[in-house]
Amino acid sequence: MTERPALVWLRRDLRIADNPALHAARESGAPVIPVFILDDDEPHFMGAASRWWLHHSLAALGEALARAGAPLVLRRGETVEAMTALAQETRAQAVFWNRRYFNGHIALDKAIKSRLQDKGVAVQTFNGALLREPWEVKTGDGGPYRVFSPFWRALRRLGPARRAPLAGMRKIPGPASPVKSDTLADWALTPDDPDWAAEFSESWTPGENGAQARLKSFLDGAINHYRDGRNRPDREHVSRLSPHLAHGEISPLQIWSAIETRVAQGEADENSAETFLSELAWREFSYGLLYFNQDLPQAPLRREFSAYPWRDDAKGLRAWRKGLTGYPIVDAGMRQLWRTGWMHNRVRMITASFLIKDLLVPWQQGEAWFSDTLVDADIANNAASWQWVAGCGADAAPYFRIFNPVTQGEKFDPNGDYVREFAPELKKLPAKYIHAPWKAPKDVLATSGIVLGKTYPFPIIDHAEARKRALAGYDDIRNT
């Protein structure tokens, strides 16, 4: 009699190494069937850019699993029904998966677990996404943290999971007979007409191997400049690991362990490494916020901000999305996002501040746009960070801290190299004027080939006046 297999339900954990669910399934001794289910109606379903990444990540994972001996099975449909049907079809004895932390996903997982157990199928779940479970890093009163600094200190004292990262597996015993599977082409996850993701592949190599290569590249150089250089979009001093983390092609434990090893060996600057680890901790903090505040992507944590006098500015929102605000650092960031599916973190803060505080467009609309256009879109990170900029979240930036897009550009892109790359119509403009083209003399504009209002827009709003308006709105809710 053929031995009953174990299913491994993969979601945002598209890797073989340090995958607790996959590892446990293999250790069970049963034939292993890895499966990915595409449910278009799943809560907070991934955006278009993430679907592009998903296509390539699944292709890479499928090849790796096939080489190991356990081909990846693809199914599309309503998750509970698809998983139940597959378990019955394969006569699975158990299903393994790594946990999720958004209420819609938790409810779905509980429903599947109940259905499977009712049919005699065992279920085992694991932490494959975080250094620590949200409920493990607690305040002295036993509750969740709402301020990052003490959270970071607590996590640092506690340390990551009490285990080393799990090694990759060259051999994974698969089923005796092939299991019916969709093909990636069936799913049409990548754009066609038009192919707005045409340039993505120039910037990214999705998949576990791509993640490991990106980590090695970062550890071999940029990490030593990270502390001081992470705010400079004109320089390559960041890791660019975020899309790989978002899709689970690498785990935070793998990154943490690799960095600590380099520091112990004297091969990485300790201060820069600590700063980077604190950024991993911000991701952990964000997941804690999400787990304990399930409406984080939609509702302000500081409820008084629900009464803020936001504006319905469709024209301004459209200009922001297209990178046509007339503020070069903002426009360069939004165009980098469109061209590459990613944006430098400092510029994310600048562009978010402009939308929220200059245009008074609700932060939820920016969060939704980033969710759709970022290859590293992450439900917890995205929501927590937008709320931080808006001033309505946990440990939020004070609402009266309003980024000036001109001075931010001059400080963090002093020579204008970042702007020149992503807003090339300004590339001939001297650095003195590149962050405020409207201040350039007419002869300088002419020499640079710029006609304001035609080749590059005038600012769509005066920042000084916008700042006054934003602060007046803040005063309104503070006094109510």
Image (cartoon, rainbow, N blue to C red):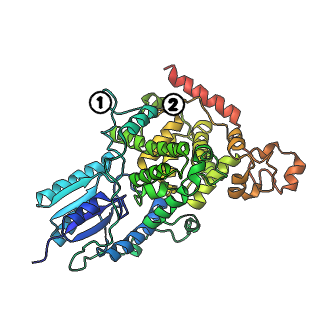
Residue at 24% in and 73% down: 173
Query: Can I make out residue 433 in this image?
Result: yes
Q: Which residue is mark 1?
A: 142
Q: Which mark is residue 9?
A: none
The answer to which of 409 and 294 lies nearer the viewer is 409
Q: Is residue 44 left or right of residue 366?
A: left
Residue at 57% in and 39% down: 356
Residue at 65% in and 28% down: 468
Tell which tag, 2 or 1, sits nearer the viewer: 1
Q: x, y percentage for residue 420?
A: 73, 55
207 over 300 or under it: above or below? below
Q: Secondary structure at mark 2?
A: loop
Q: Secondary structure at mark 1?
A: loop
Q: For mark 1, does the 10 Å Cα neighbourhood hold few (<14), some (14 to 19), or many (20 or more) residues? A: few
Q: x, y percentage for residue 138?
A: 33, 34
Residue at 75% in and 53% down: 456
Q: Is residue 300 left or right of residue 410?
A: left
Quadrant of residue 401 within the rendered picture:
top right
Q: Which residue is mark 2?
A: 308
Give the residue type at disc 1.
Answer: Gly
Q: x, y percentage for residue 240?
A: 53, 55
In the image as oriented, which residue stretches furthest toward the right?
443
Q: CA distance from mark 2 to mark 1?
A: 32 Å
In the image as oriented, which residue stretches furthest toward the bottom?
177
Q: x, y percentage for residue 403?
A: 63, 36
The answer to which of 191 and 17 lies nearer the viewer is 17
Which mark is first along the chain, 1 or 2?
1
The answer to which of 18 and 443 lies nearer the viewer is 18
